[in-house]
Amino acid sequence: MTSPSDGRERLYLYDTTLRDGAQTTEVNFSLADKQLIARMLDELGIDYVEGGYPGANPLDTEFFAEKATRKAHFAAFGMTKRAGRSAANDPGVAGLLGSAADVICFVAKSWDEQVKVALEISLDDNLAGIRESLLAARDSGREAMLDCEHFFDGYKANPAYALACVKAAYEAGARWIVLCDTNGGTLPDEVEAIVREVARDVPGDHLGIHAHDDTGCAVANSLAAVRAGARQIQGTLNGLGERCGNANLVSLIPTLALKSPYADMFAIGVDAEGLRGLTPLSRALDEILNRAPNRHAPYVGASAFATKAGIHASALLKDPHSYEHVEPETVGNQRQLLVSDQAGRSNLIAGLARVGIAVDKDDRRLTRLLAVVKEKEAQGYAYEAADASFFLLAKGVLGGVPTFFNVDRFSVNVERRYNAVGELTTVAEAIVKVEVDGEVMISAAEGNGPVNALDVALRKDLGKYQRFIEGIHLTDFKVRVFQGGTDAVTRVLVEFADETGARWCTVGVSPNIIDASFQALNDSIIYKLVTSGA
Amino acid sequence: MTSPSDGRERLYLYDTTLRDGAQTTEVNFSLADKQLIARMLDELGIDYVEGGYPGANPLDTEFFAEKATRKAHFAAFGMTKRAGRSAANDPGVAGLLGSAADVICFVAKSWDEQVKVALEISLDDNLAGIRESLLAARDSGREAMLDCEHFFDGYKANPAYALACVKAAYEAGARWIVLCDTNGGTLPDEVEAIVREVARDVPGDHLGIHAHDDTGCAVANSLAAVRAGARQIQGTLNGLGERCGNANLVSLIPTLALKSPYADMFAIGVDAEGLRGLTPLSRALDEILNRAPNRHAPYVGASAFATKAGIHASALLKDPHSYEHVEPETVGNQRQLLVSDQAGRSNLIAGLARVGIAVDKDDRRLTRLLAVVKEKEAQGYAYEAADASFFLLAKGVLGGVPTFFNVDRFSVNVERRYNAVGELTTVAEAIVKVEVDGEVMISAAEGNGPVNALDVALRKDLGKYQRFIEGIHLTDFKVRVFQGGTDAVTRVLVEFADETGARWCTVGVSPNIIDASFQALNDSIIYKLVTSGA
């Protein structure tokens, strides 16, 4: 057991966003998503990153072709060997052992009824499967662990058998035996009592907890298990996961790192810098999933430190900790009050530095820029992911951006009709009228869709500036609609790249998706011209 | 103390949706909203409905002009009298006593530091304010209670003073003294320990708990307080409330009503019928607030009983309670087996049953339908959220859907140009050519954007079918772009509602966002026609 030098006990965090989180309704990770999220978890300081089921589907097999983390353990998840064959001859186990994972997490049922009804094997065969699978993983030189599925229901129905599964794994050398509340219905007091019982037979520093949020208690269940002795917590970013989700690591980490008694008793792998990155990380995940972040999420939500009530706001100004249980900055969040000029100003200076604009903190133009940014944000613009649009907005207020060209008119048409061979087809075309230095150019283009057509037409002929934009191309396009209905506001985020591999992102907002796309495309071109010295 | 005849102890529910819930960012109740929500809470079987601050603002004063509940206590919330004047001469207390409330809930600070810093009065004056305010409310013939603001932080800082506030209220005849975790940072074990201490001095059946979700533990904190002796729980519908929200009564009620040990020990005012109304009630509140319901909400979320993984799905069909901690029907929800590419035949049958199509498991047409679904999913269609499109797809394969109308042609145009007063504007218009029973109709419409224009034009004239779709309207529109670039595939999800409140969701996929939108809009109309018996 690794112990930190300050005498606190080590508590391990195991992330299953890429495995259990992938079971979330409407979540479908691509390979690139998985690689990106694994890197984010690694940088955060998570101890274990569970990546999926190598061998069970092509995506996960490809993801496990090489190790996706640098510091964190990279864990593969799969079932124990089937009854009636050896671990060496089990294709599922082979898929796990053939992967680049350095930890193998087997899952086995620990509820006697489930072993009989769902697996239709004997209770002894299930125990043998646990032992032999763990030994096979250890023989391959890896750390091995067991997820006990249905552990709490199993323990309530037949404590001896549930415990036998745990002990079989411990005796076979499992580094961790994780007690899973698979259907999510166990309450904190039960979790605490049962984990305490288990910890009499198996050392707590080999026990983990895997909680689901079906009663709204996943975070509390995880804390209850730690109080009872468990030293590994499994969870997901933003509480992704099947049904109501898994224990939310983004809520748990600050509690463990900042709050008594946990912070006094335990050290975790996430340091102060990782903690400050938690709010941006949580929002980046939503960005990848194209979801609106939960404003009310503990610690990281936009409203988590917001105060609406007048009496609270004035008390808050007199004494911030009266309404703030932790300092928002420690988790990378910020207090939200009507009068947030100071906080706004320092955020703004940091944002400008990020896009390469140095401004003195006493520069009076900052007040105007802050007002412009707030007005834009009120309209629905978001600059967190759109650095290039933020750069142009700031340049416009601080120093001015040249007017390279004007788009006086554009027209985009989408038509569904029968084509020459009698098939129904949909065609999109765009016409753009651009004026450069008094010269007017009209360009037209077809595209797969209206935005593609507009993009191609817009970049077809910019006269003397054309040579600066020849190598750029659109690499990503995201759309979010606010407040339901096509009458609502649409926000478009666009990413471009050039031949050097540089990437930049811009934003557009309008009730009209084509207009929002035009704004973002236009910003992308202007950004390229400004940064190329055109 | 009322006790139910079965020997269980009575546990009281106190809803503060209309007071603390009104502090939620972006929530602004109208008078009609408040009246409607009070009726919903009353019918649910909530014991106390807190309506707001009569006398503090015109809306709440008007709302308290008459009693808004039939069975439930109707509670008014306000501050204890100010120091230096009598309760009889305090305008705040007068506002409360002049209302139609039958319960007055005073709030007072119980953290010594806060009394000094925020109120700037002596600790004794604060105690006197508590006593005199409660007596004034009791003298008016009402039930009186006290919310102890900052109780847990106060108790940790100065337990004697925090307890003195509780005892002063108890001795002045308060029916309830509610321990508030105002900044939401107290963890369940602390709540349990502190409430247990307080319950040594004041009977637990006079103690309440008011928890906030700043650590994700509001539900667990409420349960912890009940374990320690408290017999009133305060919370809100859907966990509305300042910052991260209050304890969510919609999560707590089923736990208290259905789960051990709470259901065995306590009786609550919500009966089995009220419980079955919980899912529709939770969604109705979101409707009033114009918010998308949280799919992952415990008990009532659309995904709360959803299973995506194939292995889980087959186990679930063998034995539902393996993955369901309560029966979904008890809370008015339903099991959802997701038709996703991870799923097989059993998910498909369950999916069909959900949309009202009964098919024998040996029906050979299932093989073809499964192949069609998989092919569609490979193209980017997702039916998890698009029940109506799934219904039409299945009907098409299994039995056929009538061809109500054909859209031979549509054209959508978006144009940016200078308007008559020289401003740059963007206009969208659509033309749709529909054929119904050999009759051709051409409709045109303008819109805020191209999808809105297309939607309006498409529903403008469907000839003899028009009467079936008069009451429908678009309520949500979501766009997801896959694999980067405008060349990529776009998935559009559209939700419609009709005048009865029924909602259905459809999907469209195409490289062209307008074409994808058209598919989804078209499916929505056809679904309405099929289910209306057109």
Image (cartoon, coloured by chain):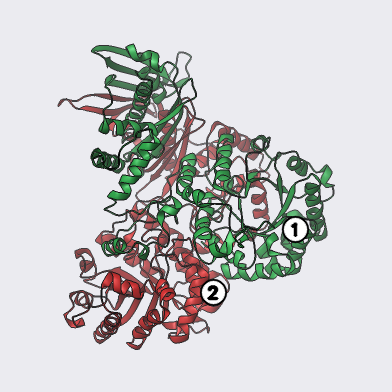
Chain colours: A green, B red
Vertical placement of residue B443 versus A299, above or below: above
The residue that appears at 60% across and 67% down in the rendered structure is A227
Image coordinates for residue A474, horizontal then vertical, percent: 44, 25
Q: Is residue A75 above or below residue B481?
A: below
Q: Amino acid at mark 1?
A: Val
Residue A526 position within the rendered picture, expressed as x and y whole percent measured from the top left: 34, 24
* Residue B132, quarter of the rendered image: bottom left
Residue A131 falls in which quadrant of the image? bottom right
| Drawn side of residue B325 relative to residue B504, left or right | right
Dot 2: element: helix
User: Where is A81 relative to A359, above or below?
Assistant: below
Reply above or below: A316 against B451: below
Q: Chain of mark 2?
A: B
Alpha carbon of mark 2 to alpha carbon of mark 1: how far? 29 Å
Which residue occupies the foreground of this view, B317 or A369?
A369
Mark 1 element type = helix
Q: Indicate the quadrant containing the N terminus of chain B: top left, top right, bottom left or bottom right.
A: bottom left
Residue A230 position, x and y percent, is 64, 63
Residue A115 numbered tag: 1
Q: Residues within 10 Å of mark 1 (few under 14, many from 20)?
A: some
Residue B262 shows which numbered tag? 2
Res. B398 in view: no
